[in-house]
Amino acid sequence: MSFFERYLSLWVALCIVAGIGLGSALPGLFGLLAGLEYGSVNLPVAVLIWFMVYPMMVAVDFSSLRRVHERPKGLVITLVVNWLVKPFTMAALGVLFFEHVFAGLIDPANAGQYIAGLILLGAAPCTAMVFVWSQMTRGDATYTLVQVSLNDVVMVFAFAPIVALLLGVTDIVVPWETLLLSVVLYVVIPLAAGVATRMHLARRAGPGVSAEAQVQRFIARVKPLSVLGLLATVVLLFGFQGRVILDQPLLIGLIAVPLLIQSYGIFALAYGWAYLWRVPFNVAAPCALIGTSNFFELAVAVAIGLFGLNSGAALVTVVGVLVEVPVMLSLVAFANRTRACFPTT
């Protein structure tokens, strides 16, 4: 694990502070960056998200799907929790808190925006960072790769319909063109680029060097781009939303409540199911963590595309970044402490 990954929580916290500070000190610059849009897509955010996602997409090996039958229990848990439970519980928590529990504490006109942001987070299970969480729990690398590959295939086809369904249920108008464009930009194109890169590297593998070794060497070289993209995105997003965060700290706390309940609840469901099913720890940990973590890069990008940089939905996805890293690190620590409760094979 790299130095940056080991202290990821610290770097994210520093970038949050830097983003809020820079956004307050240089509002003109961040206003200029916010205005760099094409077709409802913010170009600086798009570039940084591609930097984040591309190195991880190169790691996705669709040939690993041939091994999908080897660890079926972990994959069943992953698919059920990620696609049949998580989006719907997140939408339900959003409606519960922002239309009822917190109704007297927020502007009713913004409730739908906050719910939309939660739906986008709930419908986007982790793709990139799960490799980090799996590594921190010493998870089965092959299983994690199969899991991510399968998840990405499902996401290409399921993300937009699920989001549209849930936004429709909450009476939010769904701009289908923007939603589908976001899926193409932030899932399909990086995934296609990753596959093309793997194929190119495999063809270039020389004598004594396997294709996989060539791919891993390339990933090691470009992986810092992913970390730098993440940190720069955090600075940019908190720069855009810094004034709201400073002016409305109570709102940030309110948004964090359903996110925290969802995160710990989904982990408890998946991890508890894996325990009852006697799934080996090196599969149980990553299969629980992928459902808990979010593909927040996609959620942020789609929220900006659908509702705008300064929308309530975009704010919720940014708070999702704020909440996710410490939550995931706490769950990694919990998983490692409970390792002995699971079979080893």
Image: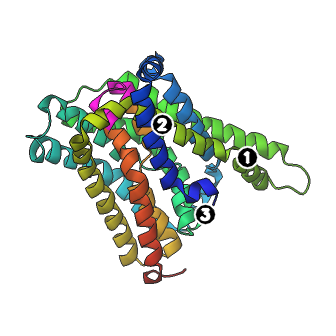
Q: Dot 2 surroundings within 10 Å: few (below 14), some, or many (20 or more)?
A: many
- What is the secondary structure assignment of the residue under circle 1? helix
Residue occupying the point 50% across, 34% down = 186
Please give left or right for residue 76 compared with residue 95 in the image.
right
Residue 147 in sight here:
no
Tag nearer the camera, 3 or 1: 1
- Residue 251 image label: none
Question: Which color scheme does this rendered protein use?
Answer: rainbow
| Separation of residues labelled 3 and 1 (CA atoms) | 19 Å
In the image, 257 versus 131, the foreground residue is: 257
Establish if 67 lies above or below 179: below
Amino acid tagged 2: Val
Please say whether residue 307 is one of the residues in the magenta stretch: yes
Please say whether residue 210 is one of the residues in the magenta stretch: no
Establish if 256 lies above or below 168: below
Please give left or right for residue 316 compared with residue 58 in the image.
left
State if disc 2 and disc 1 touch (CB < 8 Å): no
Amino acid tagged 1: Arg
- Mark 1 = which residue? 221
- Residues in magenta? 304-315
